[in-house]
Image (spheres, helix red, strand yellow):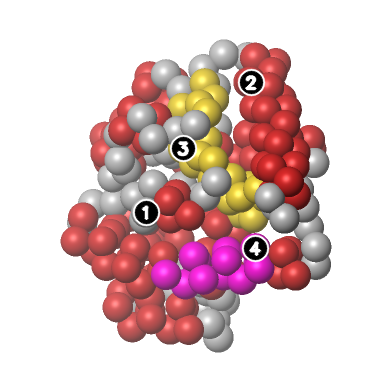
Amino acid sequence: MLQVGLTGNIATGKSHASGVFAELGAHVIDADAIVHELFLPGSATHAKVVAAFGKEILAADNSVNRKILGEIVFRLPPRRLLLNALVHPDVVAEVMRRVFTLAEQGFKGIVIIDAALLVESGFYRMQDRLIVVNCDPALQLARIMSRYGLSAEDARLRIAAQMPAQEKVKLAHYTIDTSGTYGSTREQIETIFRDLVLYTHERRNLEASCM
């Protein structure tokens, strides 16, 4: 099994890239989807977050309202750090539980760990390869404003809350630039996937020769 981290800042096209990797045959573990599950009533994570931020962050069904929570943490960095400290360990634990389950089932392919804060949390160090998705800053700003209905000021706050993209790019084995067409983006992803498959086979052959 090859464990590959996939990350990128908000509105750079990470989710699209993740979907293409899944189409090509990778098994994707989506950290954001895990957060949604952990924010449902009954989880230990839900209890910790509500205790720290209060019941005003709850939706009608008692799940954590991520929009309300986001408005708090993106404007108050100390609160964002607190949220990360409460949630990230639980997300990493669930990601690794799923990886171990795949290993026990004999999975030999490529696992994509799709996580926005892969680098910030240090979790990227546990990956065999790291892919960073990036795009033109002006395009990123426009995407955030359009997608989330935010003002330019609020959109810039979201961008500023994350590590600069170029710092992540420095750590990457591969980068994907989503500034162009869908076709251009897909071509980059397909090239990377072919290289990952080749690397997986080479590593498997090396391990076999050492036995």
Q: Residue drawn 32% across and 43% down?
A: 162
Taking 190 as reference, is 92 above or below it? below
Q: CA distance from mark 3 to mark 1?
A: 14 Å
Is residue 90 part of the magenta span, yes or no?
Answer: yes
Identity, as a three-letter code, of the amino acid under mark 4: Val
Q: Quadrant of residue 54?
A: bottom left
Q: Which residues are magenta?
A: 89-100
Q: Position of residue 184 (x, y in %)?
A: 65, 14
Q: Which mark is residue 99?
A: 4
Image position, residue 202 (x, y; %): 71, 36
* Within-10-Å neighbours for mark 3: few <14, some 14–19, many 20+: many
Q: Secondary structure at mark 2?
A: helix
Q: Which disc is residue 188 wearing?
A: 2
Majority secondary structure of the magenta segment?
helix
Q: Residues within 10 Å of mark 4 (few under 14, many from 20)?
A: many
Q: CA distance from mark 2 to mark 3?
A: 15 Å
Question: Which numbered disc covers residue 122?
Answer: 1
Q: Which residue is mark 3?
A: 8
Name the amino acid, label 2. Answer: Gln
